[in-house]
Amino acid sequence: MTHFDVFNGDADGIISLIQLRLNEPKQSVLITGVKRDITLLQQVDASEGDRVTVLDISMEKNCVALEQALNNGANVFYADHHRSGSIPESKSLDAHIDLDANTCTALIIDKLLGGKYHAWAITAAYGDNLIAKADQLAEAAGLSQEQKRRLKELGILINYNGYGAELADLHFSPADLYQALYKYSSPFDVFEASDSPYYKLKAAYERDLASANSVKPSYQGKLLTLIHLPNETWSKRISGVYGNLLANQAPERAHAVLTPNADNSYLVSLRAPLNNKCGAGDICNQFLTGGGRAGAAGINRLEADQVQRFIDITEDYYSKH
C-alpha cells in the first residue's frame, strides 16, 4: 500500500499537512508544486488499497482524477475551501469541504484535530490573508502582540515562497519547505533555530517587496486597482503576497497584480475587497485558466487583449455586489 500526500505549495497547503503528519506520521509520496499548480491529483497513480490525502486544491479542478482514484479502489481524505463542484458519493471518500470566505484548509484540519497544533493553524490563516480571523483566533488563544506579529510574518513568508511560474523561481521547493518545517512541533520553534527557512525567506521577501513597491498602478478605477509588474523572477515570487498587502492597505477596493508569462500573456492574482470578500473566484472562472475562491483567485494565462475585459468584468461585479 502506498500513501500519497497531495498539497498546495502555499502556506495553507503546507501547514495543513504539517498538522496532519505531526498528529499521525506517515511515510508518503509527496506531490505538490508552485501555488498555481492546482491540478495535482492528476499526478497520483493510485491502486486498490492505496491511501490519498488531498489538501487545499479545488475538488472541482481535480474531479476527473478524484473519480479515477476512487474507481481504482483508493481511499481518499480530502480537505479544502475552494470550489468543490459535485462531491462524489463514495464510502472511500472522506471529504471535508468548507467554502466560507473566512476559513482555510488549515483551519478545517485544526477543527478535526481539536486544536492540537493551533499555533500552526493560526500561522496558516495569516498566510492565507485571513488577518482578522487569525487575529481573533490568536487573541482567543491568549497570544501576545509580539507572538501574533511573528506568526503573521511566518505565514506570509511561507505563502510568499509558493508563488512563481515554475519551481526554479522559488527559494525552496514546497516539498523541501514542508520537510524543513515539519520538524518543528510549534511555529515559535522556527524562530529559535538559526538554520530554519525563516531567515532566508525573510531576507528575500524584503528585497522583492522593495522592488514591487517601486511600481506604480497601471489602472486605478472606481473599485479596482491594477498593477503590472515587470517580467522579472522577483515579480512572479511577490505577486500573490503583494496583492494581499495591497488589499489590507485599501480594504474597500479590489486589487489585481499582473505578471508577464513567457508567451506574452499575464498571470493574474485577484483579491476581492476585504470589506466585501466575494466574487474573486466567480470573476476569474469566466476566463479559461481562471479559478479560486471568493476572497482570492487568479488566472494562469490572461491574453493581453483580454485585460480590458477583465477590468470591465471586475469593476462591474463590485459595482453590483
Image: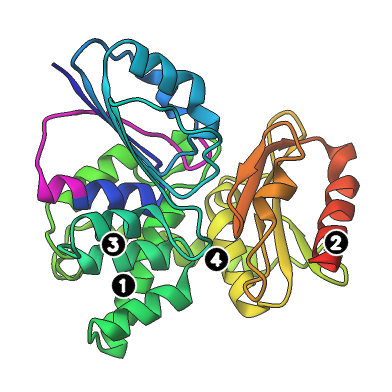
Mark 2 or mark 1, whichever is nearer to me: 2
**What label does residue 209 carry, if any?**
4
- Which residues, given as a range, are shown in magenta? 20-37
Q: Residue 248: x percent and y percent?
A: 59, 75
Considering the numbered disc 4 on the image, is that residue within a helix, a strand or a loop?
helix
**What label does residue 151 carry, if any?**
1
Q: Alpha-carbon distance for marks 3 and 4? A: 16 Å
Q: Residue at coordinates 52% horizontally, 39% vertically from top-left?
A: 84
Q: Alpha-carbon distance for marks 1 and 3? A: 11 Å
Identity, as a three-letter code, of the amino acid under mark 1: Leu
Query: In this figure, which residue is indicated by the disc labeled 3?
Result: 198
Is residue 200 shown above or below 145? above
Q: Earlier in the sequence, mark 3 or mark 2?
A: 3
Query: In this figure, which residue is indicated by the disc labeled 2?
Result: 315
Q: Residue at coordinates 34% horizontally, 44% vertically from top-left?
A: 172
Q: Nearer the viewer, residue 264 or 253?
A: 253
Q: Earlier in the sequence, mark 3 or mark 4?
A: 3
Q: Tell me the quarter of the picture where residue 262 sits.
A: top right
Is residue 248 shown above or below 44? below
Q: Earlier in the sequence, mark 2 or mark 4?
A: 4
